[in-house]
Image (cartoon, rainbow, N blue to C red):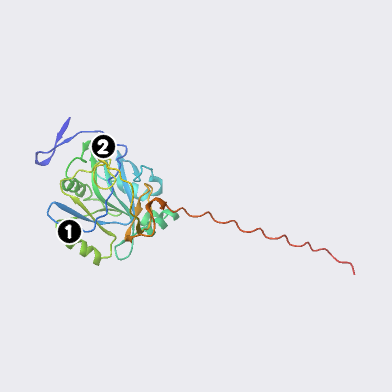
Amino acid sequence: MTRSLAGGRRAEATALPSWIKPQLTRLVDEPPEGPEWLHEIKFDGYRMHARLDRSAVRLLTRTGLDWTPKYPTIAAAVASLAAKQAYLDGELCGVRPDGTTSFSLIQNASDTGNSGALVFFLFDLLHLDGEAIAPMPVTERKERLRALLSDAGSPLHFSDHQIGRGLAFYDHACTLKVEGIVSKRLDAPPPRDSRFGSPLTLSRVHWVRPELVAEVKFLSWTEDNLLRQVVYEGLREDKPAAEVRRAVPYPKAPEPARPASPSKRPRSG
């Protein structure tokens, strides 16, 4: 069964997905140019999906964990949206006074249970009231998302974008000292089994034996065993690839046992 949409496009009527594996990004050297690209600000927070099903909300991590109890304010805001069913994609963030996002702020808010000040930046809509929005171009999905959030206030915010002028957008993002930008093709649906920004088809994967060693700096490992905020430093010619292993912190050495205090006995005069 299909349903007619504005402009003659027809969307497939489907059940609300329980979870959609998020599409992750791939680091590139420079932003793409051309009018076929859309550019967004990259936020520094927790990638989060929001699943709304007749006022019941689930906040899901990039691996499908249910973190709804951690963020009741966000869940309540999603529940108040003017939709019976929706599946939204975004980034849950802590925001500094200058408007930039901070990973440490959201960590502190999550650890202390003070999540009321967090902001949920929403940049995609994958399902809406029985319609499969995911196969549609990203521009159409974002227009649907903008309309859905038109009456929503804080802590839900629509993540706006610019079409074309990728290099200028990146330069301006640098002046604002944000984490980076994300570029998407205008006509691209969100692949459901993608890890680095394009569909992962095992039959097309060409496995290679590592021969080069690169020195990098990074912030942390993700739950998917990927590196966050990687900075390339250069090649290491002094170390063969076969000897490289993921560094594992040494266990903390036990403290040496303290000698027992000598017993104090009363002395006779």
Q: Residues within 10 Å of mark 1 (few under 14, many from 20)?
A: many
Q: Residue furthest left?
A: 8
Task: Classify mark 2: helix, strand or loop.
Answer: helix
Specify the label residue 50 is tagged with: none
Residue at mark 1: 166
Viewer-closest of 95 and 152: 95
- The image position of residue 163, as x and y in percent, is 15, 55
Q: Quadrant of the N terminus?
A: top left
Question: Which of 34 and 44 lies nearest the eye of the viewer?
Answer: 34
Q: Residue at coordinates 67% horizontally, 60% vertically from top-left?
A: 258
Snapshot quadrant of residue 218: bottom left
Q: Residue at position x 40%, y 48% from top?
A: 70
Residue reaching furthest bottom? Answer: 269
Q: Position of residue 102 (x, y in %)?
A: 34, 60
Image coordinates for residue 213, horizontal then vertical, percent = 35, 55
Residue 131's x, y, as percent?
21, 37
Residue beneath disc 2: 203
Q: How many marks?
A: 2
Q: CA distance from mark 2 to mark 1?
A: 33 Å
- Which of the two discs, 2 and 1, labels the residue nearer the N terminus? 1
Given this view, does label 2 or label 1 mark the residue nearer the observer? 2
Q: Amino acid at mark 1?
A: Gly
Q: Quadrant of the C terminus?
A: bottom right
Q: Answer yes or no: do the residues labelled 2 and 1 have beta carbons within 8 Å?
A: no
Where disc 1 sits, the SS reads: helix
- Which residue is at a point 14% across and 59% down the rendered structure image? 165
Left or right, 251 with respect to 162, comes to right
83, above or below 263, in the image: above
5 is higher (above) or lower (below) than 266:
above
Q: Is residue 155 above or below residue 66?
A: below
Q: Is residue 251 above or below residue 131?
A: below
- At label 2, which amino acid type do we have? Ser
